[in-house]
Image (cartoon, helix red, strand yellow):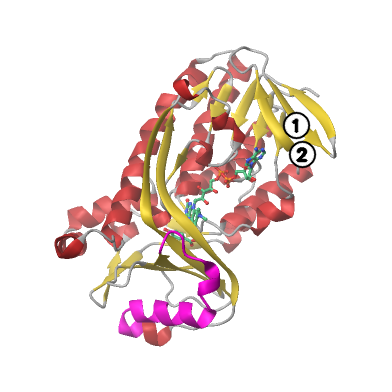
Amino acid sequence: MRTQVAIIGAGPAGLLLGQLLHRQGIETVILERRSADYVLGRIRAGVLERGTVELMARAGCDQRLRAEGLPHSGVNLCFGGQRHRIDLAGLTGGEQVTVYGQTEVTRDLMEARAAAGAPTVYEAGDVSLHDFDGPKPVVRYVKDGVAQSLHCDFIAGCDGFHGVSRQSVPERALEIFERAYPFGWLGLLADVPPVDDELIYVYHEDGFALCSMRSMTRSRYYLQCPADEKVGNWSDQRFWDALRSRLDPEAAERLTTGPALEKSVAPLRSFVAEPLRFGSLFLAGDAAHIVPPTGAKGLNLAAGDVRYLSEALIEFYGESSTAGLDAYSTKALARIWKAERFSWWMTSMLHHFPEQGGFGRKIQLAELEYLVSSRAASASLAENYVGLPY
Ligand code: RFL
Ligand code: PHB
């Protein structure tokens, strides 16, 4: 089999890249290790920057997003038992974010790809990347027990943090920057109305909590937990009790509980692998970088990479110019590091760290007080939260 761009991974990065290229007449084949249902079953991100929404429009996939996505013009910080609103729109000249689940983004992109008749090979086993140091790379994989070869011009490694693409690069060609955090997030999804019509990020002695949502009838809540926490240790009742105890009295009173549809623990990590290009292999999304979810940046960063990479590939096929491809890594990394900084900062300010002691706690509270009382500090949070310009 032959194609122009072989895409590894059918997460949001791979599917979005496929759709943007398809709209410009560039052929792609996506190879995905899991089944489509498995990919759709993963509950992850929920907050989209304007740039991500615009990219979905460019991909022709924003119809349901425009109809069902919830525009949010503010977020709340809660500490010392009080809630403080950050007026995102007021502080950024009218910018907003859109609450729309990653599951829905993925579903819309999958449906568009199927409608376009573009090929995705689900349950592709033993994917391996070859000859990407030259102009004729090959991807090998196994489907239904039969070995296959996919010849292409370029490989886009969109296969997430544990994928094969980054691991195929010789170790000496990569520089890794990493920080693991000594805690995780326990997430719960339930068909109950959200406690507030905006998100609430909670700083509390017992640990961080986050109140988010997927719709006005479906809520997504998170609690800081030990990194090696077992979901089985948390009955629904224990989760709701812990969450309620971390909220301000008014929100605690309003919290509606119900049976969990899903519960899972996610570790928190900051990670960047540089560069993003190795000959004809390009890394994009979680394959190249991870942020802790506190700033809601992971999916948006993946979309940012895809924006730069799709523009570079379109320029290559349309104008025979390699300028965009040559600039991809540097351009994307500049934006990635700003989101890494913001996510690290939000995480450091809002979580309980085992080693921080009384001094660390006081500094966090002083930072939060400053943040909600200074327009400059609030504006800095706001402009990062809604997404820095491209
Ligand atoms: P994905 O989504 O991990 O997709 C990669 C795909 O590649 C496949 N794959 C392979 N395929 C073929 N061969 C192999 N060897 C393969 N190995 C892997 C996988 O099966 C998968 O289908 O990466 P992508 O596309 O780069 O997208 C990144 C986002 O998924 C991620 O950054 C976000 O979910 C992060 N994130 C959030 N981001 C936001 O922007 N806003 C949020 O509010 C937000 N909240 C979150 C989050 C991530 C979380 N977790 C669970 C880590 C909340 C949580 C709890
Ligand atoms: C979510 O809704 O899953 C979500 C929202 C905001 C974050 C992280 C996750 O910062």
Observer able to see residue 296:
no
Along the viewing direction, whichever of 326 and 128 lies nearer the viewer: 128
Residue at 57% over, 55% down: 102
Residue wearing tag 1 = 141
Q: Residues within 10 Å of mark 1 (few under 14, many from 20)?
A: many
Residue at 39% over, 87% down: 253
Mark 2 Cβ and ligand 1 under 8 Å apart: no
**Residue 4 shown in magenta:** no
Mark 1 Cβ and ligand 1 under 8 Å apart: yes
Q: In which quarter of the image is residue 335?
A: top left
Viewer-nearest of labels 1 and 2? 1
Prevailing secondary structure of the magenta residues: helix
Q: Report the Cα–Cα distance between label 1 and label 2.
A: 10 Å
Are the residues tagged 1 and 2 within 8 Å (C-beta)? yes
Dot placed on the residue nearer the N-terminal end, 1 or 2: 2
Left or right, residue 237 beside residue 383:
right
The numbered disc on residue 121 is 2
Left or right, residue 365 beside residue 340:
left
Is 241 located above or below residue 136 in the figure? below
Query: Which quarter shows the C terminus?
Result: top left
Q: Amino acid under label 1?
A: Tyr
Observer able to see residue 276:
yes
Residue at 56% over, 21% down: 315
Residue 313 in the image: state x and y as whole percent.
58, 24
**Residue 249 shown in magenta:** yes
Determine whether the residue tagged by mark 1 lies in a helix, strand or loop. Answer: strand
Determine whether the residue tagged by mark 2 lies in a helix, strand or loop. Answer: strand
Q: Amino acid under label 2?
A: Val
Instruction: Please tell me how many numbered marks the rendered image carries.
Output: 2
Along the viewing direction, whichever of 193 and 226 lies nearer the viewer: 226
Query: Which quarter shows the N terminus?
Result: top right
Magenta residues (range): 226-251
